[in-house]
Each structure stands twice: as C-alpha cells, then as structure tokens.
Image (cartoon, rainbow, N blue to C red):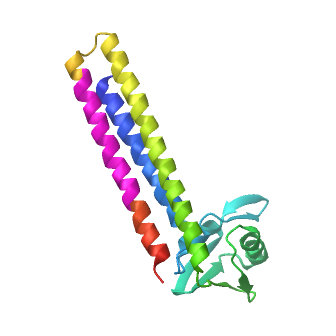
Amino acid sequence: MSIDEVMMDAEERMEKANSILKNALSGIRTGRATPGLVDSVRVEAYGSQSPLKQLASIAAPEPTQLVIRPFDVSTIKDIEKAIVSSDLGLNPQNDGKIIRINIPALSTDVRKKMVSRIKELSEEAKISIRNIRRDANKAIEQAEKDKEISEDDRDKFKDDVQELTKKYEAEATDAAKAREAEVMEE
C-alpha cells in the first residue's frame, strides 16, 4: 500500500468513526421530541426485522410529541410492541391509525446519565481514531523499513497522521459537547 493510500484510508476510517458517533448521539434523548429518537427501533413485521422508518413516517408536530403513521395500518400493533419493548422508556398510544408518543420531560438524574453516556460514546470514537492512527503509523514505519520512503518522509507522514488525528478527535469532542448542551437545556 502506498503512503497516499495509507493516508486516504486513515482519513476515511476516522471520518467513519465520527459518523458512527454522530449517528449514536442522534439516538440519545434530549428534552425535545425528534424522529431520531426511534431510529434504532426495529420492528418484527412481514416475517423479518425492519427499521421503523421503513414501515412508517415519523414526525414531531410538537416539541413533546412524536406521531408515527404506518404505511400499512396492519403493522400498527407490531410497531407499538417494538416501541414498548425497546429500551427507550417510551409509552405509545395507538388509536388504530396512528401512534402518538408523548415525550416526558427529563429529570436531572436522567440528564446526567445521558451526559455520561455521551461522554462514553465520544471516548469510544476517540479510541477508534487513535487505533487508526496506530495502524497508519505502522504502515508508514513498514514503508520506511522497505526503503520506500526516507526517515524524513516517515517523520513528515507521521506528523500528517497526527494532524488528522487531532482534527477528528476535535470533531468528536465538538459533536459530544453540542449534544451534552442539548440534553442539559431545560
């Protein structure tokens, strides 16, 4: 693998680590209702597990309420069951055509737990980014051993990898701080 390929691979993998973090953060509840809250819900319908958003449209008409409209009304019981059995702690109300979910206000304890979960997710992303840095540095050192690059080039490329690492760690930190602020606002 050439040095350019190593650098591109490292950057792509760091970008992916941050997109995974952002996706995980979108599923964490804030005081506001957002369709992202139920993104992780999988529904047993038509004999297989399907993401909720493939079976219904999800809207947040009010800051404290979600409305789920199944594309096929026959799946409404399955959707309701999946929401109840998920670990989101939501209580759906089914009127036969749509499901309404009232999002209760978060207590201070729950907010603190969510902030600690955000910090865990952020740290996991940073660890992934650091592991990617380690892999890239190993590839650079191997290229130097194989006489593909000089010592000066090795040091320069390692510095470039470190800059990438700092950039993506900062993005992860910023995403986590923004989500923490949303969770803690009342």
Residue shown at the point (50%, 58%) measured from the top left? 119
In the foreground, 20 or 72: 20
Q: Position of residue 40 (x, y in %)?
A: 62, 63
User: With respect to residue 46, does 15 lie above or below?
Assistant: above
* Tally of numbered tags: 0
Residue shown at the point (70%, 76%) measured from the top left? 72
Residue shown at the point (35%, 19%) measured from the top left? 141
Quarter holding the N terminus is top left
Res 151 visible: yes
Q: State which quadrant residue 90 falls in.
A: bottom right
In the foreground, 67 or 161: 161
Magenta span dominant secondary structure: helix
Residue shown at the point (74%, 85%) measured from the top left? 94
Task: Say whether residue 129 is left or right of residue 63.
Answer: left
Res 1 visible: no
- Let me know if residue 166 is in the magenta part: yes
Q: State which quadrant residue 146 falls in.
A: top left
Q: Position of residue 136 (x, y in %)?
A: 38, 29
In the foreground, 105 or 101: 105
Outermost residue toward the left in this view: 152
Q: Which residues are magenta?
A: 154-174
Task: Say whether residue 121 is left or right of residue 97.
Answer: left
Q: Position of residue 33 (x, y in %)?
A: 54, 80
Task: Say whether residue 55 is left or right of residue 149.
Answer: right
